[in-house]
Image (tube, helix red, strand yellow):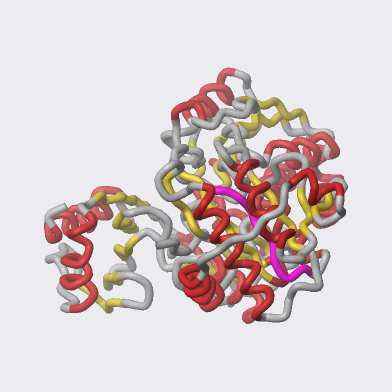
Amino acid sequence: MIKFGTGGWRAVIGEDFIKENINLVAAGILKLAREENKTDRPIIVGYDRRFLSENAARWVAEVLSAGGIEVWFLNRSAPTPLIMHTVMAEKLYFGIEITASHNPANYNGIKLIVEEGRDAPLETTARLEEIIEEITEVDSLDFDKAVNDGKIVYRKNPFNDFLDDIIALLDMNALRERGLRVLFDTMHGSGAYPLQVIFHTARCTIDTINLNRDAYFGGAMPAPTEETLVMLRNGVVKGAYDLGIAMDGDGDRLGVIDKSGRYINANEILCMLYYYLVKYKGWKGPVVRNLATTHMLDKIAESFGEKCYEVPVGFKYISSKIDEANAVLGGESSGGLTVRGHIHGKDSVYAASLFAEMVSVIGKSPAVIMDELEEMYGHYEMVEDNLHFAPSYKATIEKIVFEEKKLPEFIAEVERVNYEDGCKVYFTDGSFVICRFSGTEPLLRIFAESSTKEKALSYITAFRTFLNI
């Protein structure tokens, strides 16, 4: 069974991520395009630096070209935001990125992007799954022959428009005047090139680590977390850099290290950028976060007479609400965000550049800026845990939590419970805990936020004990 989660279809290489299934997905997209009468525009196919990514991209292109759709192909790896930008800028119907984003190295996957450069909505991926189930035969052309026949076209430097659009949104003078020294951990991913170009254009000093392609990501998860950025932290402190920046494998999640070595988490990045855009750049509008993201954003928005909108997990919900509410910014605690006026998906190239602009304009380190925000809005501690369970136990969890709607005994008073996406418990003191099944891995994810780490951990412990996992 090929199933699309919040970040596309992801599977273990050699088990389900195999040529036969990759061809089935490509054939499904082809049939979907025909069904929606959207075959008169090319489909751009990109890929990250994971094992098998380029091969898989070629297999997808062979199937699409056999079906009569022109394919735009890239001659180098590219971050997901670039594919989204190209779909938007060129008014394409579809784009495809071969990636498993921040998943472990033994995973790969396929991300479908639709009109306006958006993540494919649930209705589209549900229909795609139905189509794939019906396919019994797949046609394909030889890749080199399709190139010679003009059915697969190498796209000439799509980075140009992507980079130019980001640079046009930045205060390049502020960046040039400040001249930040930045250490960039590319995490062996595909976001390295565009960020280097932007920072060099801004006259910043940018040095890199983990720039080489490594299908095992150095033995670590390709996600910019506090645990995975130890090398970056040490390098920033030892080299006296102003800033450390890291991106995940396909360039849509961001991590930051302060010059003191302090890890700046995704929630803090969101809060700082929203505050900066409203306070210093004079933007007007609300902010959007998902259910598992800090409530500090609510307090910041309220202080400016604005609203914070809460949506389910999945960036498509964030981008839709940004459009609907004309929000300034939207993001999630896992490290992805986008800003009004840019693409409709996560983009760490722009986010990292904007963060550097913020540091340059305000003239203070991220740690100092965040400390000042906490003085104004209070201290928020978020903790999370990924709980592994036997596949056979999933039905039991669903019955207890989502059908019978039973809850653990908590130390705080419950204000209300939301079952829109998982189970989110709001407490009267402003804390919350949410548990939900991962949309990309066989895990139960639990996030909790409170005024202290100990209190937040108690909510997670309560759920673990209650479910016996």
Q: Where is residue 166 drawn, in percent x and y?
A: 79, 53
Q: Is residue 94 magenta?
A: yes
Please, which residue is most extreme toward the top here?
238
- What secondary structure is the magenta-colored segment mainly? strand
- When asked about the image quadrant of residue 165, the answer is bottom right
Q: Residue at x 74, y 47 (%)?
A: 143
Q: Where is residue 103 drawn, in percent x and y?
A: 46, 45
Drawn side of residue 204 relative to residue 371, left or right: right
Q: Where is residue 464 drawn, in percent x and y?
A: 18, 55
Residue 372 appearing in the image: no
- Note whether 238 is above or below 242 in the view shown: above
Magenta residues span 92-99
Callout count: 0
* Quarter occupied by the N terminus: bottom left
- Note whether 425 is above or below 378 in the view shown: below
Drawn side of residue 297 relative to residue 387, left or right: right
Q: Residue at x 67, y 62 (%)?
A: 339
- When asked about the image quadrant of residue 198, the answer is top right
Q: Is residue 31 magenta?
A: no
Q: Residue at x 62, y 19 (%)?
A: 239
- Note whether 180 is above or below 433 in the view shown: above
Q: Residue at x 58, y 26 (%)?
A: 236
- Comparing 320 with 104, the one in front is 104
Residue 78 appearing in the image: yes
- Comparing 137 with 88, the one in front is 137
Drawn side of residue 47 relative to residue 235, left or right: right
